[in-house]
């Protein structure tokens, strides 16, 4: 995180732009704080989440600005929370979003052996791939797909949501005719993501493409199902070596055949390729027990 201009001035009970009342702090991360807010409407009971980031000295350090930009571009996806408002005060930038349910990482931690069942993992995987397809079609890569950035809906409890777009990058830009074209990859980039879930490309400082997000999805789902990844707990350099030397069969041991097929396909894709989302989803559906076919 960059250098803030000053501390965030926010207290419980504060009104934000006469639209929301701050009720309590929900959490804090590297990029700022999250508060529960109530919308100032007829009954004052509509709840939402407000993420705040201190005003930064450099515009390049404004992570929340990117998150707001991406959120507004993917509002048509059912796998992204609603963006209710955004703006700035004299000490912070904020975005107000619909509340989500529990994060996937928390759900897994509470289960016996920290494992999610095969049918549930498959259904989550199908929705996650659909969510990433929506994001990619809008022109962005997430660059930090992991269980703690996935959640079930608070009210739509069967719907998987992806969030936290602070590290996202726009890879499709409109040309003079308005048609989206893929940006040329940079030769070398900084490390962006989380060691446990990022692809080998990220360790090698390569530009992340759409297939790299799908690697994050695959690694996340393998962990949800088996409670393990071969490089779990290793630091960046060592984790990269293990990823490079782990074959697909070893990686997908104890997983359905659709996971192995996905791993083999991802290995062949490059930055310029559009992943076969529909094929991945169909293969995952085929591994569902007959009574649970989607």
Image: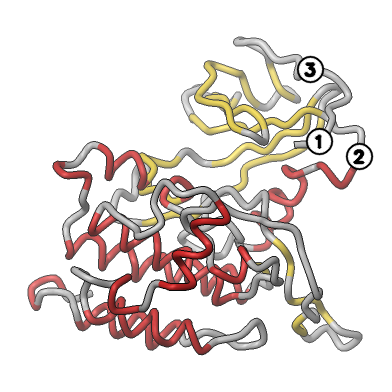
Instruction: Between residue 287 and residue 109, name the one nearer to us.
Output: 109
Report which quarter residue 117 is drawn in.
bottom left
Instruction: Between residue 162 and residue 226, name the one nearer to us.
Output: 226
Task: Name which of mark 1 and mark 2 comes first in the sequence.
Answer: 1
Q: Which residue is mark 1?
A: 2
Alpha carbons under labels 3 and 1: distance apart:
13 Å
Classify 10 Å Cα crowding around label 3: few (below 14), some (14-19), many (20 and above).
few
Q: Which residue is mark 2?
A: 58
Mark 1, secondary structure of its residue:
loop
**Mark number, residue 7:** 3
List x then y, in percent, for residue 64.
Answer: 72, 42
List x then y, in percent, for residue 2.
Answer: 81, 36
Q: Quadrant of the N terminus?
A: top right
The number of numbered discs placed on residues in the rendered structure image is 3
Contact check, label 1 and label 2, Cβ < 8 Å: yes
Q: Residue at 69% across / 17% down in the picture?
A: 15
Task: Name which of mark 2 and mark 3 comes first in the sequence.
Answer: 3
Instruction: Between residue 200 and residue 124, name the one nearer to us.
Output: 200
Contact check, label 2 and label 3, Cβ < 8 Å: no
Q: Is residue 237 left or right of residue 188?
A: left
Alpha carbons under labels 1 and 2: distance apart:
7 Å
Q: Residue at 61% across / 88% down in the picture?
A: 273
Alpha carbons under labels 2 and 3: distance apart:
15 Å
Q: How is the image coloured?
A: secondary structure
Question: Please, is residue 258 above or below residue 129 in the view?
Answer: below
Classify 10 Å Cα crowding around label 1: few (below 14), some (14-19), many (20 and above).
some
Disc nearest the viewer among 3 and 1: 1
Question: Please, is residue 148 above or below residue 25 in the view?
Answer: below
Mark 2, secondary structure of its residue:
loop
Mark 3, secondary structure of its residue:
loop
Task: Name which of mark 3 and mark 1 comes first in the sequence.
Answer: 1
């Amino acid at each position: 995180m960059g250098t803030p201009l000053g501390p965030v001035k926010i207290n419980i009970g504060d009104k934000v732009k006469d639209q929301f009342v701050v009720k309590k702090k929900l959490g804090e991360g590297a990029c700022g704080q999250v508060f529960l807010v109530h919308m100032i409407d007829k009954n004052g009971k509509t709840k939402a989440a407000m993420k705040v980031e201190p005003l930064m000295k450099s515009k390049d350090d404004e992570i929340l600005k990117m998150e707001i930009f991406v959120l507004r571009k993917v509002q048509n996806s059912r796998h992204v929370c609603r963006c209710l408002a955004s703006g700035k005060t004299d000490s912070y930038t904020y975005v107000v979003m619909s509340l989500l349910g529990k994060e996937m990482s928390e759900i897994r931690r509470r289960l016996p052996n920290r494992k999610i069942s095969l049918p549930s993992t498959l259904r989550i995987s199908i929705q996650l791939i659909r969510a990433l397809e929506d994001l990619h079609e809008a022109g962005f890569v997430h660059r930090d797909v992991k269980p703690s950035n996935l959640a079930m809906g608070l009210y739509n409890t069967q719907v998987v949501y992806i969030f936290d777009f602070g590290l996202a990058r726009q890879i499709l830009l409109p040309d003079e005719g308005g048609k989206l074209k893929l940006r040329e990859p940079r030769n070398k980039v900084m490390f962006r993501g989380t060691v446990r879930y990022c692809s080998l490309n990220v360790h090698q400082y390569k530009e992340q493409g759409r297939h790299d997000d799908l690697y994050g999805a695959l690694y996340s789902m393998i962990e949800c199902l088996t409670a393990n990844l071969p490089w779990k707990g290793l630091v960046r350099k060592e984790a990269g070596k293990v990823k490079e030397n782990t074959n697909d069969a070893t990686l997908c041991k104890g997983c359905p055949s659709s996971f192995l097929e996905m791993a083999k396909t991802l290995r062949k894709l490059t930055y310029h390729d559009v992943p076969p989302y529909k094929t991945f989803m169909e293969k995952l559906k085929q591994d569902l027990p007959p009574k649970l076919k989607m």
